Amino acid sequence: MGTFLIANKVLLPEMLVFLMSLLTLMAGVFLPTRMRESSALVFAQTALWGAIALAFWGMLAGTVTLFSGTVVVDHLAFTLKVLSYVTASGVCFYAHAYLKAMKMPVLEFYVLTLLSVLGLSALLSANHFITLFVGLELMSMPLYAMIALRRHRSDCLEAALKYFVIGAMATGILLYGIALLYGATHTLGFPDVANAIPVAMHGHHLLMSFALVFITIGIAFKLGIVPCHMWLPDVYEGAPTIMTMMVATLAKIAALGMLLRLLVSVMPALFAEWQPLLMVLVVLSLFVGNVTAVKQANLKRLLAYSSIAQLSYLLLGVFTGTTAGYSAAMFYLATYVLTTLAAFALIMCFRREDGEEAVDIADYAGLFQHHPWHAVMFAIVMFSLAGMPPFVGFIAKLQIFQALLQTGPFWLVIYALLLTVVAAYYYIAVVKVMFFDESQTPLRKVSLGLGNGLLTLNALGVVMLGVQPSGLLTWLSL
Amino acid sequence: MGIHEITLLTIFAPLLGAIVTGLACRVWSNQAAHSMTIGGVAVGLMSALYLAHWTLIAHPGFSDNWTLYTWASYGSSHFDVGFLLDGLSAIMLVVVTFVSLLVHIYSIGYMEEDPGYPRFFAYMSLFTFAMLCLVLGNNFLVLFFGWEGVGLVSYLLIGFWFKKDSAAEGSLKAFLVNRVGDFGFLIGIALLLSYVGSLDYAEVFTKAPALANLTISVIPGVVWSLPTLICLMLFIGAMGKSAQVPLHVWLPESMEGPTPISALIHAATMVTAGVYMVARMSPLFELSDVALTTVMLIGSTGALMMGLVGIVQHDIKRVIAYSTMSQLGYMMAANGVSAYALGIFHLTTHAFFKALLFLAAGSVIMGMHHDQDLRHMGNLKKYMPWTYAVFLIGTLALVALPPFAGYFSKDAIIEAVFLSTLPGAKYAYVCLVLGAFVTSFYSFRALFLAFHGKERMSTHQRDSLHESPWVVRVPLLLLALPSVIIGAVLVEPMVYSHAGFLSHGEITVLPNHDVMTTLHHHFDGVWHLVEIAPQGPAFWATLLGLGFAWIAYIKAPALPNQLAASCKVCYQVLVQKFGFDWFYQEVIVKFADSTSQVLYKRLDMGLIDGGIVNGSGRMVAYVAGLMRRLQTGYLYHYALIMLLGLVAMVTWFMLRHYHIG
């Protein structure tokens, strides 16, 4: 056992997360009721921060492949894993008080979160289509279940069902794409497939293109971009906000991981095919996301459409096909996740008079008068999402545009910039409502417990990383 | 702690005070607010003194140029946040933090009953932070950040009493005029970036000589020397910030702000940023005689003109404001004749005695219940002896009578301009000597009107006249001391010493512009400087001004009105401030207004707003409405769209494959 652990020390993070998820489950059975919930939080945080430490330790060994080449731990897997552990840890802190207030089962939440993170880890380390698929499913299943945790609420159930059905379809499509690829290359390990594709291109070019389209559509579901974006606003709106936060962050990390793994590492030979494909997706998504967001009255729906647009900027980075572009996409993802965490945590802070979450933009009229600091944090988040200096969103967009300017096409830069202007409109409209409109009935602020301090740190992080981005930029560059 | 950490402490301690106080301003008591900010600035002053001691005395010639971090880099150019600590910035550091601290303390008394008390202190500390960035930056990015930062706080503070219309207008005017200056400044910086490829001072100055022979043609057919264009553009920025003719019109309006602000921002520190900037850019300005001549002529013209306008002002603060513009003219003139050290020296002495004058005027204004009109004062020395004493000291320093501080700096400037070989130097010399007479006249006029002569205030005002509290008097005394001695103390190390504060490469002077070496030959100890005062014309001009003021406002108080009546034209020219405001208001503003009306109605409302902006806005809204209708909420619609997308893509690839379409 000991030698196995040392030999496979790069897998220690996953093992720890797995063990702690079981331990949390046990805690629910054996610990006295009053200790259950806080001990679950402690277990979850221990698992995640322990995993981060172990991941850094494991990374000292450099890139490692394991289990007959089905698992790989390289810089991409390492950075995205650390990012997902940090994200999950933030989600758990934000969740604790919220779950109790919403009367949602606390223990199940932590167990499912850990399992989902475990799946995400496996997905990010996948070096084989089977590993990838298992990881993907292990990540997605808990998410479906968690959205339905408020099972007496029909809107939550609706959201869970929609997410599940569309997700199942997307998985089917992805699997079909993998099958097509297997048919053409007769292998499933990533390096083998990558080697086989140029050979197979001669006989099975069309088949390969189809495989590419199916796989890309499968990933597009995770990213939530056109044409797989329709579910997004409904799920964002219907799910409990803490779950929206998770879908909006963890799932996107998985999506970028898959994009970089599958398109960039496995199918570089098909670059001439996937670049125009991504371009079409980006052009459509930028338009649909930004334009539709303008008319939204519900803040969560607005953030849903905004996320369609945000992730198309990320996709632009991958579209360039350059290392600079991939690194820009990584940075974009990290900053998007950071900002999104703060955005949904801020929504979780406020309730209407009837105790429901305040999700309409109009609810926030005059927020500045009653809760100035929260209004300022909202403004920070919105300005950052709009891509204004000195916030981190500006640096992220700048990196993307810089990479895109190197490769072109130039009209795409102009197009994306023009839609940024539209985006600035709806983000700033929210800020305007908060600072300049007269409040009708003041919102009730609820405490997020430990999340309160984290929220302030989170919002300040959005500013600090905008002022001092170089460290993160270096760490995330591929 | 190393020097870097102390530098950071100097800069960020005031910022910390500003942020904490700003965030807590709704909950905190006044006392907590001023303790926090004063604490921050006091830490700043302590560390600034340490840095100054280190740089100027312990390690003369010490220069510390370092980068805190790289904010962004694009291609080969990188934008850093970095700082440069040398003799020049060390002097500025001490001036800024010292005056700032005293003004903070003074404000405890002055702003006592103001409802915006914590906000006021937060702004002042924020200003201090921005000003420190401005003087400590090692590149144009940080300089510009500080430049805009002090500007921003200045607008906020001019409009501090924003419910008062004149304050709101004053802050708007300051904002607009400074935009003109900043426009030039930005063009200058952009030119440097495009020709040198860096914003770093060190790099720019090393590569600057290579620019000397480059030319640029902005308008086809007209060829300009590149360094001249760059320097003139930078100087336009300095003109805006340092209120040089003709971009000076905002400074009198800025007097609508609270008096401590006038002392800190509009006398001692921010308005001298232009002088500092030109001195810092000396390696660039030295390359262009045209630019230097422009600086000298504009400075000296302003020195005389603004002094003349000061004679006819009735508002005690405006008299001092015009005097500030006049003195800034002296500093610029010094820069123009390449006597940068003298410019900075006058900046330093001026910071002390002008802050003193403003704060003393503030004390008068408090006593007079916010009546600032000199015509309502008189014989205040009886009621406010302390204020009278310090105001007198400030006045003596300002009119440059030996051995007060102003004498050493101003007299040397006049002499340096006399020695200059630039074209127009004679004109500048005459302006500055006449300026000395004018300075003396308006300064003693204000002193006599306020503190001597008949009591002209209402009985109600007289009954409640009182000396200001100690919290106001202590800063006054602490400023009065340097106003007396700082000139004598600093004149040798700052100006006349070959191993002085500014003689280790902080400033660059080409041999053909060097007037300072000749000045050095005249130097024979501080006391000797005082002894030779009567040999220069400025001394007699000053005494003449004093005499005239005494006759006109003490001996024969009816005289000024008779003079004004007998020479209506001259009087009107001065009252109209040489017509700059009229020109801007009637010509530029009217022209812009009518043009913009036409553009607004036809082009903007009709074409752009109606067609493009609202049109595209409506378009976006319309399309958004359509899109939203697609969002039916039905699961099978969503699935259908996904599958249709898949089919479309597959079809597209199929068509591509068979080379159809």
Image: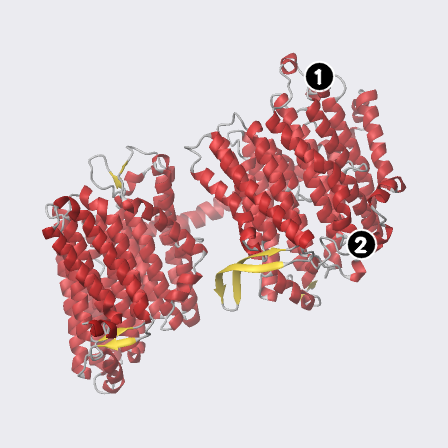
**What is the x, y in percent for residue B519?**
83, 52
Q: Residue furthest front?
A: A2
Q: Is B47 positioned to the left or the right of B522 in the image?
A: left
In the displayed structure, B293 sits above or below B450; it is below
**Relative vertical location of residue B50 with respect to residue A134 in this rendering, above or below:** above
Q: State the quadrant of the N terminus of chain A.
A: bottom left
| Mark with earlier residue (1, 2) | 1
**What label sits on residue B456 in the rendered view?**
1
Mark 2, secondary structure of its residue: helix
Q: In screen coordinates, is B420 left or right of B63?
A: right
For badge 1, the amino acid type reads Arg
Q: Residue at x 26, y 48 (%)?
A: A94
What colouring method underlies this structural image? secondary structure
The disc at residue B516 is 2
Q: Quadrant of the C terminus of chain A?
A: bottom left
Q: Does dot 1 land on a helix, a strand or a loop?
A: loop
Is B271 located above or below residue A314 in the figure? above
Q: Residues within 10 Å of mark 1 (few under 14, many from 20)?
A: some
* Badge 2 amino acid: Met
Counting from the top left corner in percent of width and height, residue B541 is at 85, 36
Disc 1 chain ID: B
Residue at (73% x, 52% y) in the render: B340
